[in-house]
Amino acid sequence: MILMAAMFSAAVLILPGVAAGWVVGGSPEFGGPPPVAKSAAEKKILEVLAEIRGGPWMANVDPLHGRLLRILTESQGARTVVEIGTSNGYSALWICLGLKATGGRLITHEIDPRVADLARQNFKKAGVEHLVTVVVGDAHDTVSRLKEPIDLLFIDADKDGYLDYLTKLLPLVRPGGLILADNMARPRPSPDFVRAVTTNPDLETVFLNLERTGISLTVKKR
Ligand SMILES: C[S@@+](CC[C@H](N)C(=O)[O-])C[C@H]1O[C@@H](n2cnc3c(N)ncnc32)[C@H](O)[C@@H]1O
């Protein structure tokens, strides 16, 4: 009887997902059915993304956050996206899916030259190396080289550094531009960052996907 009840509950949880072609929460593409490539170029990027997911674990964004980055990059018509924390280029590749459509570019920052090399290899494999500039060094210093308006800023590096990145780059974020910060649930950035994005009247912020790693989404008001 208990077994039957357990089987019934499992079916109720799983069947709607199966009917839609994916399993709720259990899929690496958590957040919906996997993206459908519109072109050979998109297919190539999606294949490299899948390859990275299937390889050794690295602290990459949740695929849901990657897909959100792509959607926001494309819908913003972003010309300049800045990322802090490149790692092997997983989130950057999601951003590139959007940039291919907008004609924009990504400037991504990484302190570790070995993972920066891995990222460059992945960008080449995905055919997007012309869209990305990888800046190697401590981003707390290297971001001072940025001068152009930023359409979308993605912060995903040292968690204690989030406030410093925000303070240094907020003046460059254009009115209507977006700031996303990863790991708002775990491992959390310092409370100072949360305070800064939730108490500044120039900003409007929501926190998403908090049952997983969590991400914040902030617009710089016009
Ligand atoms: C969570 S990983 C980034 C994951 C990446 N955004 C993705 O989803 O594929 C954080 C990265 O930030 C880098 N990092 C940490 N401190 C940094 C700093 N001060 N400047 C630049 N990069 C830094 C780390 O070396 C690491 O590769």
Image (cartoon, helix red, strand yellow):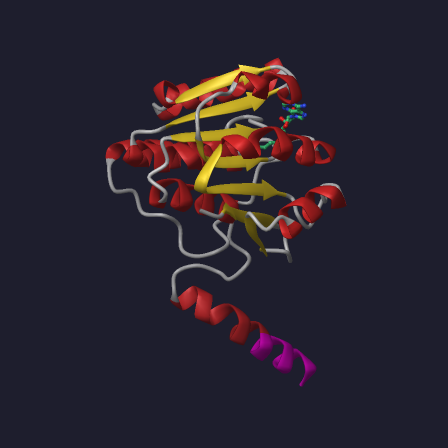
Quadrant in the picture for the N terminus? bottom right
Q: Is residue 6 magenta?
A: yes
Q: Is residue 115 above or below residue 56?
A: above
Regarding residue 57, the answer to whether it shows in the image is: no
The overriding secondary structure of the stretch rendered in magenta is helix
**80 vs 114, nearest the viewer:** 80
Drawn side of residue 201 relative to residue 222, left or right:
right
Indicate the quadrant where residue 33 lies: bottom left
Which x, y percent locates residue 155?
A: 58, 35
> Is residue 38 in view from this perspective?
yes
The residue at the point 74 percent across, 43 percent down is: 192
Q: Position of residue 154 (x, y in %)?
A: 53, 36
Q: Which residues are drawn in magenta?
A: 1-9
At a point 43% along the width and 32% down the height, the residue shown is 93
Q: Residue furthest left?
A: 39
Q: Nearer the viewer, residue 208 or 172?
A: 172
Query: Quarter-wise, where is residue 149 in the image?
Result: top left
Q: Residue 41, image x and y in percent? A: 28, 31
Residue 3 placement (x, y as % from top left)? 66, 78
Answer left or right for 2 relative to 7: right
Q: Residue at x 45, y 65 (%)?
A: 17
- The answer to if 137 sits in the magenta stretch is no
Quadrant location, ligand no. 1 = top right
> Which residue extends farthest bottom?
1
Q: Residue at x 62, y 21 (%)?
A: 139
Left or right of 57, for residue 65: left
Q: How many marks?
A: 0
